[in-house]
Amino acid sequence: MIPNGISAWELAVIIVAFVASGLVRGFNGGAGANFITAPVLALTIGPREGVPIIILLNLVSNIQVMPGALPHTNWKRMLPVGIAAIVMAPLGAWILFVIEENLMRRIVAGTSIVLSLVLLSGWRYQGPRGLPIRVGVGGLGGLVTGSVSMGGPPVFLYLLSGPGNAASQRADFLAFGLMVQLGAIVSFAISGLITLELLLLASILFIPFTLACWTGMRLFAKASDTQFRNYTLWGIAILSLIIAVV
């Protein structure tokens, strides 16, 4: 069953985008995973419907993979990041709700390109890593997540430039995702952005997205710390190229 207003061709494109996103999410915890799905959904069904679907499916995938990441998560570091993200996510949802849809579609595409360039530049944060920085990074991540679904890069750059191996960095990023997505979903529900039509499309995408996430998790289990970093950066480079072409 295809939701009203979506052609079979558009649905096929959306499924392919979520499969690619699921592979990235399962492998590295989600950094860059929404760079494909956000522009595709913004162009096919609009950002007000697309962003909640992305966050909802990402939340489901994080709940599935989080048990394995729990032993590696640094909650002392991530709780301030996550709480700040939860506080700011409603403001992002408000921006998504009030801005005219065509303008919001351009904002989604522009945000995707800018964050891709930042990640591709190889820049690493070298400054202080105390509580104010964690709160600031988390707040920025929550704001961007609630508005365009791509709040991961600020937090990912913060984690990737810090101490810890691939397992701990991935686990910390998953913890951030779980917290900010919960905050965003509550905000979307209160705003009336989560509809039966949206839930129907999300249910169609659930199986291919989940299978892709599991495949990405298995690939991560076979990767070394160096491979984790290299594959993540190459994956982001490919996603950025796709976005530039589209």
Image: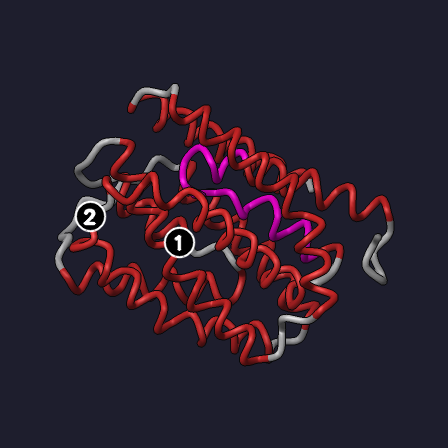
Mark 1 residue type: Gly
* Number of marks present in the image shown: 2
Q: Position of residue 5 (x, y in %)?
A: 85, 61
Callout 1 crowding tier (Cα within 10 Å): few <14, some 14–19, many ≥20: many
Mark 2 residue type: Asn
Query: Left of 73 or right of it: where is 181?
Result: right
Magenta range: 23-42
Q: Position of residue 204 (x, y in %)?
A: 71, 50
Of the pair 47 and 99, the residue shown nearer to us = 47
Residue drawn at point x = 29 percent, y = 24 percent: 225
Image: 77 above or below 101:
above
Report which residue position mark 2 lands on.
74
Query: Left of 34 or right of it: where is 77?
Result: left
Decide: marks 1, 2 in contact (CB < 8 A)? no
Residue drawn at point x = 57 percent, y = 80 percent: 191
First in sequence, mark 1 or 2: give its number. Answer: 2
The quadrant in which residue 207 appears is top right
Predominant SS of the magenta segment? helix
Q: Position of residue 163 (x, y in %)?
A: 17, 38
Label 1, secondary structure: give it: helix
